[in-house]
Image (tube, grey):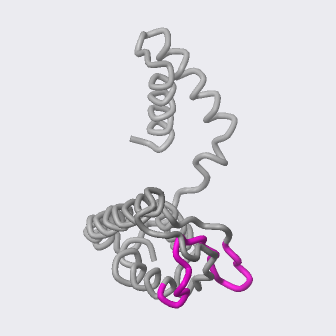
Amino acid sequence: MSRVALALAVLTATYALVLASVHPWDLALGATLSAGVLLAFRPFLLGRRPPPVEGLVRRVLALPGLVWAVLADITVGTVRVAAVVLGLRPLERPGIVAVPVGERTEAGVVVSAFLATLAPGEYLVDVDWSERRMLLHVLDARDPDGVRERFDRFYRRYQRRVVP
């Protein structure tokens, strides 16, 4: 299936999901609107053919480990935030920690920032590309070196295999 046909099908399906209707007239209107969007924005939406991904099989095989680690990180973050909110643990020193980008690619920085933001108690404030560091707000910033080490260890152990 060509990329245009796939994009047309996905856009039409999205339209049908938003309407919560698969009536033939709704699908026809959705397909017409989708075709118009593709014609108007094809260079932006589809661009040129993406280059092949190196080590795709290896990356796909490493993905379950990354997903498992992210779920564990979300669980730990949820427990920490719940303990602070319920008054079981004091909020001692929240703050911003500068985490070096290191060997991450641009896509790797985006994924690292997204994964960090998924866990409660941590979120991306900014990426300083000139100094190659991410600024993360964390719930417990008493040990910034420990936070940096934890993010680096997570990257080296789980993320680098999937999105370097």
Residue 103, relative to residue 9: is it above or below?
Answer: below
Say which residue appears at 32% left-offset and 69% top-offset: 69
Residue 9, relative to residue 21: is it above or below?
Answer: below
User: For this rendering, which residue is in front, 62 or 93?
Assistant: 93
Across and down, in percent, residue 78 comes to 39, 60
The quadrant in which the C terminus is found is bottom left
Residue at the bottom extreme of this rendering: 145
Across and down, in percent, residue 101 comes to 58, 82
Residue 124, relative to residue 95: is it above or below?
Answer: above
Say which residue appears at 46% left-offset and 84% top-offset: 152
Region in magenta: 127-146
Side (left or right) of 149 relative to 73: right
The question of residue 45 being in magenta is answered with no
Residue at the right extreme of this rendering: 130
Say which residue appears at 52% left-offset and 81% top-offset: 104
Across and down, in percent, residue 124 comes to 60, 67
Side (left or right) of 46 relative to 19: right
User: For this rendering, which residue is in front, 121 or 40?
Assistant: 121
Say which residue appears at 55% left-offset and 73% top-offset: 109
User: For this rendering, which residue is in front, 44 or 118?
Assistant: 118
Q: How many marks?
A: 0
Q: Quadrant of residue 98?
A: bottom right
The question of residue 143 being in magenta is answered with yes
Residue 156, relative to residue 84: is it above or below?
Answer: below
The quadrant in which the N terminus is found is top left
Across and down, in percent, residue 162 comes to 38, 71
User: For this rendering, which residue is in front, 111 or 13?
Assistant: 111
Side (left or right) of 98 relative to 83: right
